């Protein structure tokens, strides 16, 4: 497969997303093209699973090209998106002598990208960072500049908008992903189809088996289309004044599931898969979408081995309380992203909370 590139158009802060097999070897060249010089120290942030597979390779190619890079290795998993781990990386950045011309390289999935990006956004009031995604889900998290850590009371509540200088996506890394994480990544791929492109949803249905087996040509197409949907929306509305909220399909429910399960029982992709089903069911119930959208949403997510039913013991009332801390909630009013058809979504305001509770209670009993 050849290397593909697309651009997130943001004026002076525009940047490329470069996608290809074996791209970790090309990191020094791509850093130079992005204007990241070898005069100041770099800090690679990664997690323990990724470090054992890819850290030496990255350090070796950087060293050979004259870059000096320290590494900060965090525990794998969502619980690392915390103030405590943020503080630890900050300390390591200071000890490594990072200055205002330094850059942070986020080598990993969305946890590493969100956390390292937030360190970069705040270290000395903001330094450069580069996304080196290694999960399928990170086709979404590495693009768009939302960087954040979690609070026990709510997901991504502490964060910033800080765009990377370049996204370097080595698709070879996906071959070592555990299947549960492959499934999680497809939740966001499917989301991009459900938001913006019915024909992409059809294609994801037809090719589900080959995609699940990580056929490299098809996978690269899925990643490119997902990134393109995201890049276009981010280019129009970088800081979520309007349209960008559409990328949050399923997330008001999903983020509440994650927070209530202490960021451990469900991963992000699983949580938003269930969330997208609930959004479809609410949409049908209020007459916003035609009957059938809930079933089709569930079916496509099942093709990718994702959960579609209520997560365990969580009480709907508790879920609703946490949903109210969603960043789309304004003046105490919940705003939900709902599908009107496959490939079309809108933010719907002032939905009766009792109706949302009824839908969730039905799911508990189903
Ligand atoms: N900023 C955004 O726009 C955005 C978008 C979507 C999701 N997110 C965030 O992304 C996070 C989820 O990201 P994720 O699903 O990538 O999770 P993750 O970063 O926790 O990675 C999942 C697991 O896969 C392992 N792993 C990563 N790459 C591997 C590889 N190549 N081989 C083997 N194992 C590998 C990790 O160690 C981890 O155990 C959530 O915190 C979510 O909120 C952010
Ligand atoms: O980039 C966006 O905008 C998204 O909403 C993408 C989501 O997949 C992602 O999970 C994001 O981190 C959620 O943002 P939040 O503002 O709801 O925390
Ligand atoms: Zn998400």
Image: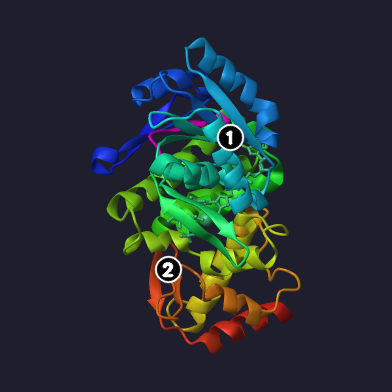
First in residue order: circle 2 vs circle 1: 1
x, y percent for residue 59: 58, 20
Q: Label 2's element?
A: strand
Tell me the residue at 43%/70% (across/down).
328
Residue indicated by mark 1? 92
Q: Is residue 203 magenta?
A: no
Tell me the residue at 55%/89% (across/down).
354
Q: Is mark 2 within 8 Å of ligand 2?
A: no
Q: Nearer the viewer, residue 103 or 305?
A: 103
- The image quadrant that residue 268 belongs to is bottom right
Which span of residues is magenta-colored? 164-171
Number of numbered discs overlaid on the protein picture = 2
Q: Nearer the viewer, residue 110 or 278?
A: 110
Q: Is residue 108 visible?
A: no
x, y percent for residue 331: 40, 80
Q: Which mark is residue 14?
A: none
x, y percent for residue 259: 63, 65
Q: Are marks 2 and 1 in contact (CB under 8 Å)?
A: no
Residue indicated by mark 2? 341
Q: Label 1's element?
A: helix
Q: Quadrant of the C terminus?
A: bottom right
Residue 288 to residue 182: above or below: below
How far apart are the two marked residues, 2 and 1, measured between alpha carbons? 48 Å
Residue 190 to residue 274: above or below: above
Between circles 2 and 1, the one closer to the viewer is 1
């Amino acid at each position: 497969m050849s290397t593909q590139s697309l651009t997130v158009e943001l004026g002076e802060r525009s940047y490329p997303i470069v996608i290809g097999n074996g791209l970790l070897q090309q990191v020094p060249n791509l850093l130079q093209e992005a204007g990241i010089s070898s005069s100041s120290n770099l800090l690679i942030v990664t997690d323990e699973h990724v470090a054992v597979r890819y850290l030496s390779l990255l350090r070796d190619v950087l060293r050979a090209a004259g870059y000096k890079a320290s590494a900060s290795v965090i525990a794998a998993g969502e619980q690392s998106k915390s103030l405590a781990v943020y503080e630890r990386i900050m300390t390591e950045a200071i000890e490594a002598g990072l200055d205002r011309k330094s850059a942070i390289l986020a080598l990993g999935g969305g946890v590493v990208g969100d956390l390292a990006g937030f360190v970069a956004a705040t270290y000395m009031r903001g330094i450069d960072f580069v996304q080196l995604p290694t999960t399928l889900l990170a086709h979404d998290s590495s693009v768009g500049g939302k960087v954040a850590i979690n609070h026990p009371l709510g997901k991504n509540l502490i964060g910033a908008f800080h765009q990377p200088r370049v996204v370097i996506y080595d698709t070879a890394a996906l071959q070592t992903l555990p299947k549960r994480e492959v499934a999680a990544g497809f939740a966001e791929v499917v989301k991009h189809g459900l938001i913006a492109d019915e024909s992409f949803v059809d294609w994801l249905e037809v090719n589900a088996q080959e995609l699940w087996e990580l056929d490299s040509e098809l996978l690269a197409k899925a990643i490119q289309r997902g990134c393109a949907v995201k890049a276009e929306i981010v280019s129009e509305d970088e800081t979520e004044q309007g349209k960008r909220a559409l990328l949050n399909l399923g997330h008001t429910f999903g983020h509440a599931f994650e927070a209530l399960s202490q960021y451990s029982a469900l991963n992000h992709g699983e949580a938003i898969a269930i969330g997208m089903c609930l959004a479809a069911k609410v949409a049908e119930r209020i007459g916003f979408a035609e009957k059938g959208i809930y079933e089709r949403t569930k079916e496509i997510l099942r093709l990718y081995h994702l959960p579609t039913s209520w997560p365990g013991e969580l009480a709907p009332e508790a879920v609703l309380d946490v949903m109210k801390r969603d960043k789309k909630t304004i003046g105490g009013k919940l705003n939900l992203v709902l599908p009107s058809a496959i490939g079309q979504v809108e933010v719907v305001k002032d939905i009766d909370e009792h109706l949302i509770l009824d839908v969730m209670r039905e799911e508990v009993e189903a």
